[in-house]
Image (cartoon, rainbow, N blue to C red):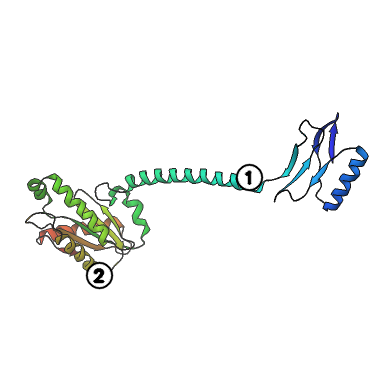
Amino acid sequence: MPIYIKRFIEAVFIVDIDISNIDRYVANYNDEMMTHYEVEKNNGLLTQKIEIPYTKDNNKFIYIGLSFFGVLICALKIYIVIECIYQIFNRVFLFFYQRIMYDSMTHCLRRNVFDMKYKTLNSRSVILFDIDHFKFINDNFGHAVGDKVIIAMGKMLQQQAKKHHLYFRWGGEEFLVLLPKTNKQALLSYAETLRAAVEEMPLLKDRKVTISLGVSEQKQQEHIHQTIYRADMALYQAKQLGRNKSHYL
């Protein structure tokens, strides 16, 4: 029902009832008021079109409802904008995450994020190793070659690491592998796998690069840093026993 104020249409009030009643009402209203309102049915999926006469543009219509394709296009635009924003923030997040969490040379986790990461494992075992005679390598082959050896350690860990293993660059030439609690025999076997993988690398001319490893299991009620301390002592003993060895403590 049109609502007139001072002969101007200020609003249109529509009640959704049977369409035949609407047609009858519009026809009766046009007869009484000498108007020419018309309703066009099926004008789109979500819309109806009502013609308002006595305007400067005789083809001017009012559309009631929503345009299905308009809504679709609008939703598509919103999706594209949101997806672009997500991709930008995701790339920025990954950029900073990689630099905060990982060592840029070896791509191992940094030591300063250890306390954040180790809690993902309930019970743990530790393998701590470093490169034998690394100062000799730097002094006799140059620091560029020393860096190449360190980078090779990172690649070796990525190749040998299994699911749920975490590996860290613990110091300059020292690395730590954190893995789920494993029995002594299996732990030493994995340590030997790492040792043999390094020994087979052709990193230096006429000289093999080797590592020494300290191995330890976390005991009941023992803090992980105590376990690492025992692994460090085991590493020291492996050095004392001649290097290129794994030692359990």
Q: Tell me residue 219's x, y (percent).
A: 29, 64
Q: Is residue 249 visible?
A: no
Q: Quadrant of residue 236?
A: bottom left
Image coords of residue 90 (percent x, y): 42, 46
> Which quarter shows the N terminus?
top right
Which image quadrant for residue 125?
bottom left
Q: Which mark is residue 186?
A: 2
Q: Quadrant of the C terminus?
A: bottom left
Vertical relation: 183 (above or below) 46: below
Of residues 77 and 238, the one nearer the viewer is: 77
Query: What residue is rendered at 88% in x and 49% in y?
Result: 24
Q: Residues within 10 Å of mark 2 (few under 14, many from 20)?
A: few
Residue 223 or 103: which is nearer the viewer?
103
* Element carrying mark 2: helix
Image spot of residue 8 (x, y percent): 83, 31
Front position in the image: 117 or 196: 196
Q: Residue at x 15, y 48 (%)?
A: 146
Relative image position of residue 111 (x, y in whole percent): 28, 49
Q: Disc count in the image?
A: 2
| Amino acid identity at mark 1 | Gly
Does label 2 or label 1 sit earlier along the sequence? 1
Q: Are the residues at dot 2 and dot 1 in contact (C-beta closer than 8 Å)?
A: no
Q: What amino acid is found at the position of numbered circle 2 in the picture?
A: Ala
Label 1 belongs to which residue?
Answer: 70
